[in-house]
């Protein structure tokens, strides 16, 4: 409460969707500063003509660090590093120190050919490493998310599932200085929200389908050529119900992606327009990509003919957010959310590489260019 009081006295207002995000505008309504408060830690940005000394004077600071190319800054266990690449500034978020602390993990020799299910002791080990990896994949390593989710089969978890977690941890250790790279994608009223959604039908426990969702910020050039993407959100999870077909699984995943994309669209629209999110609505253009031709064909129809009426609800929900001209079919190798839907080492490595400089590619021609 005291933090809110002091920041409001400086002219900051709270974001409608996140009360711990404080925004300061100038007399013309232009954003000049934003501060994210996490308990007693602040993370802020400001325009170069803003007098930051007013904020410094309002609080007693244990330490005050500025993020630039001279040295990284650690915030809540995540290392933020500004670096130059091809003349452009980028920010890398990694958890190198946490990954180092995982140590070396491996199954005892011959365990895969032993008892088919985990022992009580092994289940404890599974929960421990899964918890560590869950923290990682939710903060800076999305490419580990599908392994963590799909390996958990409750009492039916196997030694191979535990080995999959160990392999994921080993991959993280091999690439511990990597993470998410945030690129210099402009945030303005012409920005574009880009969502990807994919699903692997019935590949999770109890015949549920694993879905993957990505939400990025990009530019309107994305419909014409490969463009930079700024990763905003991701999710790998199991469908809440058993679905009857690949189309049903893909429709459910697309619904989830559009929901998340719409939320972030409104979140950003409040920042850009200075109107409360629930009033401003989603003002930015929203594009969506699927590699499911059956879903694409349904979603661009005015009256889709689906025997599965529950899936029709998902399709209609997608259509409310994405008009036909903003829905794109892409080949599977350009469906970047695919890396969130299955356990596959090659796919994990490909997804990892993409995260080092996310690109939005909506056509084969754009990729070749």
Image (cartoon, grey):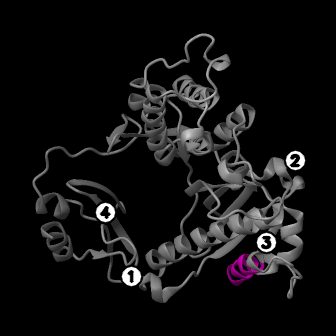
Alpha-carbon span between mark 1 and mark 4 = 17 Å
Residue at figure coordinates x 45%, y 29% from the top left: 120
Given residues 144 and 224, the one toward you in this image is 144
Quadrant of the rendered structure where residue 62 is?
Answer: top left
Identify the residue position indicated by label 1 in the image. Answer: 29
Given residues 1 and 182, the one toward you in this image is 1
Q: Name the mark nearer the viewer: 4 or 3.
A: 3
Q: Secondary structure at mark 2?
A: helix
Quadrant of the rendered structure where residue 48 is?
Answer: bottom left
| First in sequence: mark 2 vs mark 1 | 1
Identify the residue position indicated by label 2 in the image. Answer: 368
Q: Would residue 356 be seen by someone viewing this image from the given angle?
A: no
Q: What span is colored magenta in the figure?
A: 312-321
Alpha-carbon span between mark 2 and mark 3 = 21 Å
x then y, percent, for residue 308: 81, 76
| First in sequence: mark 4 vs mark 3 | 4
| First in sequence: mark 3 vs mark 1 | 1
Q: Secondary structure at mark 4?
A: strand
For residue 316: magenta?
Answer: yes
Given residues 9 and 303, the one toward you in this image is 303
**164 shown above or below 90:** above
Q: Name the mark nearer the viewer: 2 or 1.
A: 2
In contact (CB < 8 Å): disc 4 and disc 3: no
Badge 2 crowding class, 10 Å Cα cut-off, few under 14, some 14 to 19, many 20 or more, is: few
Q: Is residue 9 left or right of residue 203?
A: left
**313 shown above or below 198:** below
């Amino acid at each position: 409460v005291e933090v809110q009081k002091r920041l409001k006295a400086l002219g900051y207002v709270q974001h409608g969707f996140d009360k711990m995000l404080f925004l300061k505008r100038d007399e013309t309504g232009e954003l000049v500063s934003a501060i994210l408060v996490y308990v007693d830690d602040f993370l802020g940005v400001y325009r170069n003509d803003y007098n930051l000394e007013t904020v410094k004077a309002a609080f007693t600071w244990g330490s005050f660090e500025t993020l630039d190319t001279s040295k990284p800054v650690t915030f809540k266990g995540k290392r933020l590093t500004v670096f130059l690449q091809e003349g452009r500034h980028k920010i890398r978020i990694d958890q190198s120190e946490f990954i180092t602390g995982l140590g070396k993990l491996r199954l005892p020799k011959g365990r895969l050919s032993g008892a088919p299910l985990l022992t009580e002791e092994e289940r404890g080990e599974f929960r421990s490493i899964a918890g560590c990896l869950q923290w990682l994949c939710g903060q800076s390593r999305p490419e580990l998310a599908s392994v963590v989710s799909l390996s958990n089969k409750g009492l039916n978890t196997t030694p191979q599932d535990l080995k999959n977690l160990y392999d994921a941890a080993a991959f993280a250790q091999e690439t511990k200085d990597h993470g998410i790279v945030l690129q210099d994608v402009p945030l303005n009223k012409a920005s574009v929200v880009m969502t990807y959604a994919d699903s692997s039908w019935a590949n999770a426990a109890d015949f549920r389908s694993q879905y993957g969702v990505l939400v990025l910020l990009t530019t309107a050039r994305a419909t014409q050529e490969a463009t930079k993407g700024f990763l905003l959100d991701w999710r790998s999870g199991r469908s809440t119900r058993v679905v009857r077909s690949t189309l049903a699984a893909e429709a459910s995943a697309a619904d989830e992606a559009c929901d998340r994309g719409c939320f972030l669209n409104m979140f950003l629209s409040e920042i850009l327009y200075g109107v409360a999110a629930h009033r401003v609505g989603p003002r930015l253009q929203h594009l969506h990509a699927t590699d499911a031709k059956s879903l694409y064909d349904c979603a661009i129809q005015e009256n889709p003919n689906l025997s599965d009426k529950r899936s029709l609800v998902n399709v209609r929900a997608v259509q409310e957010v994405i008009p036909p001209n903003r829905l794109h079919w892409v080949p599977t190798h350009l469906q970047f959310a695919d890396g969130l839907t299955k356990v596959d080492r090659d796919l994990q490595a490909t997804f990892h590489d993409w995260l080092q400089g996310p690109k939005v590619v909506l056509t084969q021609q754009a990729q070749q260019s």
